[in-house]
């Protein structure tokens, strides 16, 4: 019924968002589960305890065509001093949205408000009716940034503000079916001062940063990364997103505000890319020189990519130098605690290298003073295979320091020698030392 009314309005006149809930039973609404926290937040904000409910401009309205039409027309005819301009960009991995808000000249200030940026799916049809009997779905919300609570918004007359948010792209989304909405709402009165909506334009190319590699074969430490005092070639891989137009005549300019890195060659080119293709500037790489006194640190680079009908700056961070610590996140079939480790390092102000066991065979462990090898909650006899044991033995034989963290490493006899020879412990053994008696049940 709602769509029968809203379809008569242009996108310049009306923005539509449908917040799906976890009911009716069985509670498996896919759009609710796409962003449950955001949906719950909006339900709580409006005090919704039953659906459907309709709000126009922040005010609840009855579910009838005439009433809804009158409410929408009232909002359209209500002057507002604010203008929102939206730009949405997809780089193949994420959707970036920039909302520019302009306030007209006048004697006023808008405060105690929130600005919201929302992703919706424009339309989906189901052959089998949902539990509520619906088969056609318009503008269901699939994400809000920075959250369902929005961000605090204050603007004065004559002022222009810009807000940018990013959404990690879900592989099940159809980028051609995504609508982007932004609106500004009073926290005290619920009034929506202004809204805007747009689509992601697929009539142009969409180029994005993918990866970086380094050629340092002629340097003092040839390890395929930029170390202190080295001058290296920097090869950047970019991608052309599916569904968009080919990237033609691609060039790029590299820059950084970090004075610990000097860019010697800042301009490069890439071959034309068809949608879904990747390419590098290996024929004309960038060149950088790293300061001799730099400690391992992340440096932020800006790459201005230009192609036919495309001009955008992409930003990425790269690690300069080799940290003292390597974390081998070997979680296998168990829980991935990589984020927990990252948060711990960050709280300590420590920058580690992070590797998986798939990568470890190309990593020189002896570059690191300390290696932390964690298998987390993984269990079974294949926690550490023979090739990995050889890598660990070689590292320790060369004077390395190893911290091993594993919940179940002692539950199988396959690692008896590792625990006994390298850590001096026997699983389940009761020991008496100067501090008393202890039982070694878990190694970690």
Image (tube, rainbow, N blue to C red):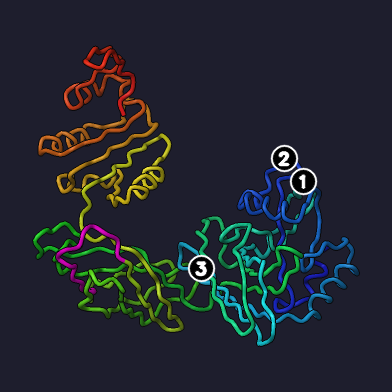
Chain-order first, disc 2 or disc 1: 2
Q: Position of residue 436 (x, y in %)?
A: 27, 13
> For the residues carrying marks 3 and 1, which lies nearer the camera in this image?
3
Task: Please name the residue that numbered disc 3 is placed on.
Answer: 96
- Report the magenta residues as a range: 285-299
Label ID, residue 64:
none
Position of residue 193 relative to residue 187, above or below, is: below
Q: Position of residue 396 (x, y in %)?
A: 14, 35
Task: Please name the residue that numbered disc 1 is placed on.
Answer: 131
Measured in 3D between alpha carbons, the distance from the residue under mark 2 to the one under mark 3, in whole angstroms, is 34 Å
Q: SS for tag 1?
A: loop
Q: Which residue is found at the position 54% from the left and 75% from the top?
A: 162
Q: Position of residue 359 (x, y in %)?
A: 27, 47
Q: Position of residue 210 (x, y in %)?
A: 36, 64
In the image, 347 versus 145, the foreground residue is 347
Q: Is residue 297 inside the magenta stretch? A: yes
Measured in 3D between alpha carbons, the distance from the residue under mark 3 to the one under mark 1, in whole angstroms, is 34 Å
> For the residues carrying marks 2 and 3, which lies nearer the camera in this image?
3
In the image, 113 versus 263, the foreground residue is 113
Task: Please name the residue that numbered disc 2 is placed on.
Answer: 26
Give yes or no for contact between labels 2 and 1 (Cβ–Cβ under 8 Å): yes
Q: Is residue 8 inside the magenta stretch? A: no
Give yes or no for contact between labels 2 and 3 (Cβ–Cβ under 8 Å): no
Is residue 356 found left or right of 142 in the rendered image? Answer: left
Q: SS for tag 2?
A: loop
Chain-order first, disc 3 or disc 1: 3
Position of residue 401 relative to residue 88, above or below, is: above
Q: SS for tag 3?
A: strand
Residue 178 in view:
no
Q: Which residue is found at the position 70% from the left and 46% from the top?
A: 22
Position of residue 222 relative to residue 236, above or below, is: above
């Amino acid at each position: 019924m709602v769509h029968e009314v809203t379809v008569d309005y242009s996108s310049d006149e009306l923005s539509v968002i449908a917040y799906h809930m976890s009911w009716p039973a069985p509670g498996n609404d896919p759009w609710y589960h796409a962003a449950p926290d955001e949906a719950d937040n909006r339900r709580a904000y409006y005090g919704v305890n039953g659906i459907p409910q309709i709000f126009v401009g922040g005010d609840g309205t009855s579910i009838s065509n005439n009433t809804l039409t009158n409410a929408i027309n009232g909002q359209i005819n209500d002057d507002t001093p604010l203008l929102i301009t939206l730009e949405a960009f997809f780089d193949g991995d994420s959707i970036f949205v920039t909302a520019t808000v302009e306030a007209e000249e006048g004697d006023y200030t808008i405060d105690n408000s929130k600005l919201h940026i929302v992703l919706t799916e424009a339309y989906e049809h189901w052959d089998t009716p949902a539990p509520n009997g619906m088969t056609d779905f318009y503008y269901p919300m699939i994400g809000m940034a920075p959250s369902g609570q929005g961000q605090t918004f204050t603007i004065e007359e004559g002022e222009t503000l810009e807000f940018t948010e990013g959404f990690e792209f879900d592989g099940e989304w159809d980028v051609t079916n995504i609508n982007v909405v932004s609106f500004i709402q009073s926290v005290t009165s619920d009034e929506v001062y202004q809204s805007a909506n747009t689509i992601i334009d697929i009539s142009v190319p969409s180029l994005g940063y993918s990866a970086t590699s380094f050629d340092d074969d002629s340097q003092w430490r040839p390890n395929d990364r930029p170390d202190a005092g080295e001058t290296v070639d920097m090869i950047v891989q970019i991608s052309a997103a599916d569904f968009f137009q080919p990237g033609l005549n691609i060039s790029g300019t590299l820059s950084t505000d970090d004075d610990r890195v000097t860019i010697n060659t800042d301009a490069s080119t890439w071959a034309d890319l068809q949608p879904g293709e990747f390419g590098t500037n290996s024929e004309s790489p960038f060149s950088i020189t790293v300061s001799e006194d730099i400690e391992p640190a992340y440096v932020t680079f800006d790459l201005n990519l230009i192609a036919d009908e495309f001009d955008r700056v992409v930003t990425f961070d790269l690690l300069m130098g080799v940290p003292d610590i390597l974390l081998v996140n070997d979680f296998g079939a168990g829980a991935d605690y990589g984020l927990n480790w990252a948060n711990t390092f960050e709280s300590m102000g420590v920058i580690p290298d992070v590797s998986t066991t798939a990568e470890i065979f190309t990593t020189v462990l002896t570059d690191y003073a300390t290696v932390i090898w964690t298998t987390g909650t993984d269990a079974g006899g294949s926690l550490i295979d023979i090739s990995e044991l050889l890598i660990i033995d070689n590292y320790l034989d060369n004077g390395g320091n190893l911290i091993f963290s594993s919940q179940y490493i002692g539950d199988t006899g396959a690692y008896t020698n590792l625990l006994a020879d390298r850590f001096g412990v026997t699983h389940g053994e009761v020991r008496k030392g100067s501090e008393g008696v202890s039982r070694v049940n878990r190694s970690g």
